[in-house]
Amino acid sequence: MRIAFISPGSFPVPIQYGGSSVETAITNIAGRLPAHWNVTVLGKRFPGLKDKETRNRVTYIRMENTSQRSYLDSCIRYLNKFPHDIVQVENRPAFVPLLKKRLPCPVVLCMHSLLFLHPRALGGRNPRNCLNSADHILTNSRYLRSLLLSRYRTSTPVRPVHLGVDTGDYISRWSQQGKRIRYRLRSRFGVTGRTVVLFPGRLIPIKGVHLLLESMIQVVKKNPRILCMVVGGSRYGSNRETRYVRKLKQMARSIHPHVRFAGTIHPTKMPQYYALADLVVTPSIGKEALGLVNLEAMASGQPVISTAIGGIRETVKTGVNGILIKPSRLKHELTAAILHLSENPALSERLGRNGRLIAERFFSWDHTARQYARLYYQIHSSRKGRT
């Protein structure tokens, strides 16, 4: 079978210095599809990357980095010259009507958020018409599927398939290998004997980092051995200091020895930060469709404190692998939750071990790729049956 992915073009694929869940998903799923399939990923050109190359059995074709319409036209010309059995568009519903008009094969739309269904992103197109133009729609959570159906009432079949995590790269801190790595890293980072609270993610208001720092001011009064490590930048792959980032650093000054800003970290180094932590806090106040960082924390054997919102509720369960707090209660309950886990190592271990088992069983990239492959088989078989 011949499968083509059309990336949004915002960041390189495969991931180089950073990217959203979209580029992460393409990178991790494309190479895990059946070995005998012909898989192509179309994207834009970026410095240091060839116009065409093959990695991990996946062919990457990179178009000139121009406007979105020119990029889409280039993708269509390539796909007409080299036909594929199925074309999947990642998070760009505006692309679908023209692809359906000019390509003979089924078009699958994979939605990672509702951001690109806003009028400005659609360039005047009707969002429901864009959704209805697709043959199938994938969403990264049941929550996002319910939003699509309730807001836009699309007639296209919508199937939720959770994204995943590489359970080989992210090693449980409770395994023998994980314990050795953790001991070495905690010594190297100078955090031996401290309880490390990790925030991994973008430094933007909807991620709730300010709420975490407000809580840390209270936490360190009761436990001065706690350290909060903030990993991430204002944008994927960027350490640009926005007004919000400056606000966060100003907040942290009063407890400076207890907060470290690590900045943007290359994706390959993120497992190290999870390994040296004691718990992960992701206090999002936006409508998270899923939350990949929670899956990474789970795979690392870390208990997760997060918000009972959006697709996060499909991955984190209170008393099972973490603690969920209602958004309206974050200011009142986050401090207590951090102290509760930091003072109960047996509970943290149980939640962390459970998280690892859940990640292995339900949220590995291999599991995600198998679900994608089953859908592609169904689409392909159904099409062959009609011809």
Image (tube, rainbow, N blue to C red):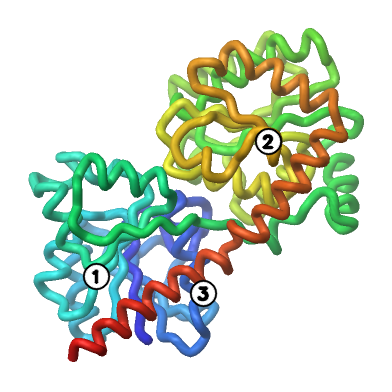
Q: CA distance from mark 1 to mark 3?
A: 20 Å
Alpha-carbon neighbours of circle 3 within 10 Å: few (<14), some, or many (≥20)?
Answer: some
In the visual, does 280 lie left or right of 313? right
**Mark 3 = which residue?**
31
Q: CA distance from mark 2 to mark 3?
A: 31 Å
Kindly identify the residue that appears in the image at 52 percent across and 44 percent down. 314
Q: Image quadrant for the C terminus?
A: bottom left
Q: Earlier in the sequence, mark 1 or mark 3?
A: 3
- Which mark is in front, 2 or 3? 2
**Mark 1 = which residue?**
107
- Residue 72 falls in which quadrant of the image? bottom left
**Mark 2 = which residue?**
322
Kindly identify the residue that appears in the image at 85 percent across and 27 percent down. 344
Residue closest to the eye, 281 or 245 = 281
Q: Position of residue 359 (x, y in %)?
A: 65, 54
Give yes or no for contact between labels 2 and 3 (Cβ–Cβ under 8 Å). Answer: no
Q: Image quadrant for the N terminus?
A: bottom left
